[in-house]
Image: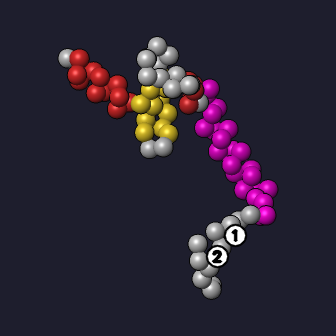
Amino acid sequence: MVFIKGHKPYNYWLGKSRSEETKQKIRNKLKALYANPRNHPQYIGKIKRTGYWYIYNSTHPFRGKQNYVAEHRIVIEKSMNT
């Protein structure tokens, strides 16, 4: 990466810390989001990673280490079996 005069370097945020007000806002937002434990991603059974939706399925032969299978894989399997 070439440095251009007047531009911020890629790591301008290093060494800076969040203000107490910002930390409190983040805390409140997370508390509100996870107030109901069923809203936590591990209970919903569907998560998004690297642009793909994954569905929890502990018995699928192509599941990952955490027992999630890509949604598009399940959709194609269903369409091919019918």
Q: Which image quadrant: the C terminus?
A: top left
Give the percent coordinates (x, y) of residue 81. 23, 17
Give the percent coordinates (x, y) of residue 56. 48, 23
The residue located at (74%, 50%) in the rendering is 24
The residue located at (59%, 30%) in the rendering is 40
Residue behind mark 1: 12
The residue located at (68%, 49%) in the rendering is 26
Q: Farthest residue toward the front? A: 1
Residue 20's label in the rendered image is none
Q: From this viewpoint, is residue 45 visible?
A: no
Q: Which image quadrant: the N terminus?
A: bottom right
Residue 8's label in the rendered image is 2
Instruction: Answer whether residue 34 is magenta in the image.
Output: yes
**21 relative to 35 in the view: left or right:** right
Q: How many residues crowd around disc 2 within 10 Å: few (fewer than 14), some, or many (20 or more)?
A: few
Tell me which corner region of the image, top left, top right, bottom left or bottom right, holds residue 37: top right
**Front-lying residue, 6 or 24:** 6
58 is higher (above) or lower (below) than 7 = above
Residue type at mark 2: give it.
Lys
The residue located at (56%, 25%) in the rendering is 65
Contact flag, marks 1 and 2 (Cβ < 8 Å) = yes
**70 relative to 43 in the view: left or right:** left
Span highlighted in magenta in the image: 15-37
**3 relative to 21 in the view: left or right:** left
Give the percent coordinates (x, y) of residue 55. 45, 26
Instruction: Answer whether residue 76 is magenta in the image.
Output: no
What is the CA distance from the residue labelled 1 to the residue labelled 2? Answer: 6 Å
Q: How many marks?
A: 2
Tell me which corner region of the image, top left, top right, bottom left or bottom right, holds residue 7: bottom right
**Front-lying residue, 46 or 8:** 8
Residue type at mark 1: give it.
Tyr
Q: Assign a secondary structure to mark 2.
A: loop
